[in-house]
Structures are given as structure tokens and as C-alpha cells.
Image (tube, helix red, strand yellow):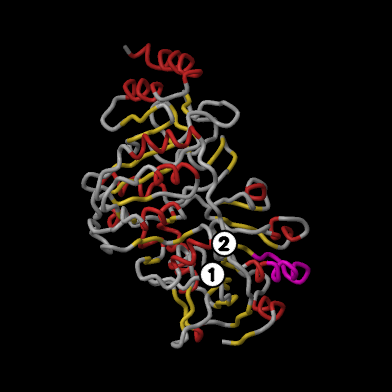
Amino acid sequence: MRIVSVEEAVKVVKSGDRIFFQGAAMTPNELIDGLCNRHNELKRVEIVSIHTEGDAKYTQEPYNKTFHLNSCFVGGNVRKLVNTPNGDYIPIFLSEIHLLFKRDILPIDVAFVQVSPPDKHGFCSLGVSVDVALPAVRTAKKIVVQINPSVPRTHGTGIVHIDEIECAIEVDRPIHEHNPGTISDIEHRIGQHVASLIEDGATLQMGIGSIPDAVLANLNNHKDLGIHTEMFSDGVLSLLEKGVITGKEKAVKRGKIVSCFAVGSRKLYDFIDDNPICDFRDAAYTNDTARIRRNPKVTAINSAIEIDLTGQVCADTIGSYQFSGVGGQMDFIRGASLSNGGKPIFAMSSTTKKGVSKIAPFLKTGAGVTTTRAHVHYVATEFGVVNLFGKSLQQRAQALISIAHPDHQETLGKAAYERFNGRK
């Protein structure tokens, strides 16, 4: 492994190459910015990534004339570009992104990743973002890394040996943090409703944000919960300290927190660092429905942008505007529904910040169906929780109306009557 300058490291990239950027807290921003500085020398460079942190210069003028983003997930820093001809989005389950690399559908020329300093055996850790970074480095023609002592060394399979690395730069700065926000009254009520569904010994999957945090804050009296998730954040720490999360009932990696990435505060990263309780794997492992379902009482907590009266869930677009991505929602919704005693749950506020009902007669024109109505079981808002499993279309509509905001229930009731009246 050669230690070089940023300018030297990014010279590995040639015109016409396809580059992978590691994401989330591990985004290698110094390498990315260095590559962007070469925009006048390069042509037709394709970027593949999931969610990244930082200002994403490659999405901005004049860099976006050289770099084309083909994203497998959409975050706020790339959202504008993805909805223009200069960028694009690939609808795909997180569990299947690795297949794009392995099957040479999107072969990677160069992988940019951020790693820990090598251990005495020469192995560097991919830190808290193993997800699709591991299959990217396993298949890339060349690996370029930035070595950072602030990267937590994670247990699991997220490692790369110095002999595999083309060249490296050295940086010393904190990785990206996401500190917990304040839980609102509405979110707290949603958290209470969802927590009432969670049984002792359940295996949890949750994301980041105030609603997952609100759920976790209401689990202090539970026992022997486990974690098998796509990602986790600070909300698990207090439950671990109180002995609520033990993983004793899990079938897969008993006693361990299984995840493919984590985003949170420095306190979270310090907890993860060299902690054998945390087992970081690639997304093909964590999000494998057959593996998820082996755990008992898998309780998957996911979000939605919009749900129609039959239970169709849109979680990645606003109309035809690409807002986020498919991600791992379906991987875990299906895994939970097939688990013994499992509960797939959608948790959301009843309205947007502008007061628009998230329970709608129909999804917006152009909206993507992220999760089909046949897959949807529990839906929770601040006004309650309903189970749609086994209910007819008309029964689903009535159930969803019952947990809609009262200001919208009359309108939704009329819409349901107009839709179904002709069939009675």
C-alpha cells in the first residue's frame, strides 16, 4: 500500500471509469473533492453510490458536466440532480445491490472508501458502513482509501487488507455524526402505539429518526429484545445499558447486534469501536429475507411518505419526484411477516408538516409503490394502530380512516364511498 497525496490518489481514475463511493458516516469526502478537482481533465465518469454525506460537489456546476451520478439511493445532497437529466436513480432492494457488481451489470473500476488504520496483520476496517461497500471493494479493479484514525474498527466481515489497496491518503477528522433530535408529542404518541405491539424477546429492525427513537424510548420495561437491522443509531444505547437489549432469544447471531451500517453520535461510534457485541455485515447478509425470518418475533419498523386507502405504500417518491429510495424496506417487511410471531409495521404521522393527509384516497400520480398492499400489515399514526392483514379493500379503507387525522376523515370517508359504493 502506497501512502500518497490526494492529487496522486485520484489520478487512478480515468475517463470513462465507473467509481463507487462509500456512504453514510464513512463517506470519503477528501477523495471525492480531490476527484472533482480533476473535472477539466476527465470525461464521462460515472458515480455509483447509496446515501452519502457532504456537499457532493459532483452534483454541482461545473463538475456535473464531467460526472454522472447513477445512484442506488437518494439523499438530500443529490436529490436535485437525480431529478434532472444529469443524474439518475436505480430502483433496487438494498439486499440486491451487490449483484450489480458481482454480475458485471455495473462493474466497478475504482472504489473510494474510508478505513481505519491497519492492525498488526495489515487489515483495515470499513468502519460503520459495510453495507454495499464490502461487495464494491471485493469486485473493484482498484481500491483507493483514505485512512482515518477516527474510523471505528468494527467486528464482522467489513475488512480490507493493505495488499489489496492501490494507494491511500491519510486524514484525521471526525467521521460524519447525526445527533438525536427532540421527540415531538406526535412522535411520542406514535412511539407508544408501536411499542405496545412489541413483545418481550422480539428481534427489532428500525431506522434513524425521531419516530424510531420514540419507539425505543418506550421499551424500558421490555425484556430480552434483540437487534437484527439494516442500520441503527443512538436510540439503542440506553436500552443496552439497562439490559433491555440482550439478544438472548435471537436465532441468528445470538447475543449480537447485527447491522450493515450505523449513523449517530460520537458516543455511538465509541461504543461500536472494537466491540464484539456489534457484528457488521454486508447488506446481502443483513437484509436476506430468509435469514431475517429465522429470528423470533421480528418487528420491522418502517416509514412511509403516503399510504392509499387499500394499503399501498409509497416511501421513496413524492409523485414522480424521486425523494429517497427503495432501500431495505421490503427486505424487512417480508422477513418480519414470515418470522414466527413477526410484525411488519409502518409508523408515520397522520399529516405532513403542511397538514396534508398521508393517508390518501389514491397515491399521487407518478408515485412509486414501494411496498405492495399485500405485504402491509400494521400501520400506526399518532391516532392509533391498525392491522390490515386479512382485511378486504373496504375493511382496509375503514381501518386506515380510523387512524387518519380527524380533519381529513370525512373527506377520506367520502372517497371510500365513491370508490366502493358501485360494488355493493
Taking depth in this image into account, of 102 and 154 the one nearest to the observer is: 154
SS majority, magenta: loop
Residue at 37 percent of width and 58 percent of height: 241
Report x, y in % for residue 251: 23, 59
Q: Farthest residue to the front: give it.
A: 242
94 displayed left or right of 242: right
Q: Amino acid at mark 1?
A: Ile
- Is 90 a magenta residue? no
- Picture quarter with the C terminus: top left
Q: Which numbered circle lies on residue 108?
A: 1
The picture places residue 133, in percent across and down from the top left corner, at 49, 67
For the record, the magenta segment spans 33-45
| Circle nearer the N terminus (1, 2) | 2
Q: Say if the magenta span includes residue 35.
A: yes
Residue bearing the label numbered 2: 48
Residue 321 coordinates in the image, percent (x, y): 60, 40
User: Element at badge 2?
Assistant: strand
* Mark 1 Cα shell of 10 Å, populated few (<14), some (14-19), many (≥20): many
Residue located 54% across and 43% down the image: 182
Residue 145 in view, yes or no: no
